[in-house]
């Protein structure tokens, strides 16, 4: 719950996700947008209850954003909660499992992006070129696969 926001990914239409890198730290990392200014710019959208938000384990994002002074509003669907409701006995409700089952899609894994050992490098150490496809795929799969594919 003390996670720092390294970047943000969004999908507002199918197959068109975007990633905003904010705090990638590795030798040769390019200059990135200022996290405070970027979140201040996004605050009206994130706090707008009329703009529907869908996420995977969005309660976690909610908690992290709250630490940055943002009150996420307009949450209408959480793919992790839906996965649990559809099959509460399943052991895993992560996005990789959901994408494989409902979309027949094998996702890029966190381990692949961070070097094989969970949290060994941390996402801030992942080169932006590798972070973009991973983060955008998460946003795109969540957007494309939410209500339509999970609930009929």
Image (tube, rainbow, N blue to C red):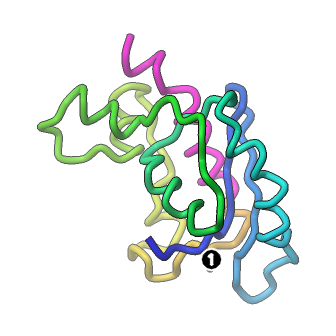
Q: Quadrant of residue 23?
A: bottom right
Q: Position of residue 142 (x, y in %)?
A: 53, 36
Local crowd size for mark 1, using a 10 Å CA cut-off: few (<14), some (14–19), many (≥20): many
Q: Position of residue 84 (x, y in %)?
A: 25, 36
Q: Quadrant of residue 53?
A: top right
Residue at the image position 52 percent from the left and 55 percent from the top: 61
Q: How many marks?
A: 1
Seen from the viewer's position, the closer of residues 8 and 109 is 8
Q: Quadrant of the C terminus?
A: top left
Residue at the image position 52 percent from the left and 53 percent from the top: 62
Residue at the image position 78 percent from the left and 51 percent from the top: 42
Q: Quadrant of the N terminus?
A: bottom left
Q: Which residues are magenta?
A: 132-152
Question: Which residue is outermost to the bottom?
Answer: 27
Q: Give the main secondary structure, helix, strand or loop, of the magenta stretch.
A: helix
Q: Secondary structure at mark 1?
A: helix
Look at the picture and state if 63 lies above or below 52: below
Residue beneath label 1, please? 124
């Amino acid at each position: 719950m003390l996670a720092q926001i390294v970047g943000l990914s969004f999908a507002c239409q199918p197959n068109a996700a975007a990633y905003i890198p904010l705090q990638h730290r590795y030798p040769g990392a390019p200059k990135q947008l200022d996290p405070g200014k970027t979140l201040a710019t996004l605050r009206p959208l994130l706090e707008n209850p009329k703009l529907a938000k869908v996420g995977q384990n969005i309660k976690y994002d909610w908690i992290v954003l709250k630490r940055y002074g943002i009150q996420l509003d307009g949450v209408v669907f959480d793919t992790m909660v839906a996965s649990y409701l559809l099959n509460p006995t399943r052991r895993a409700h992560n996005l990789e499992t959901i994408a494989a089952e409902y979309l027949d899609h094998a996702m890029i894994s966190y381990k692949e992006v961070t070097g094989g050992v969970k949290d060994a490098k941390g996402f801030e150490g992942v080169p932006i070129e590798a972070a973009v496809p991973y983060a955008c795929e998460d946003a795109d799969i969540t957007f494309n696969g939410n209500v339509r594919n999970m609930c009929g």
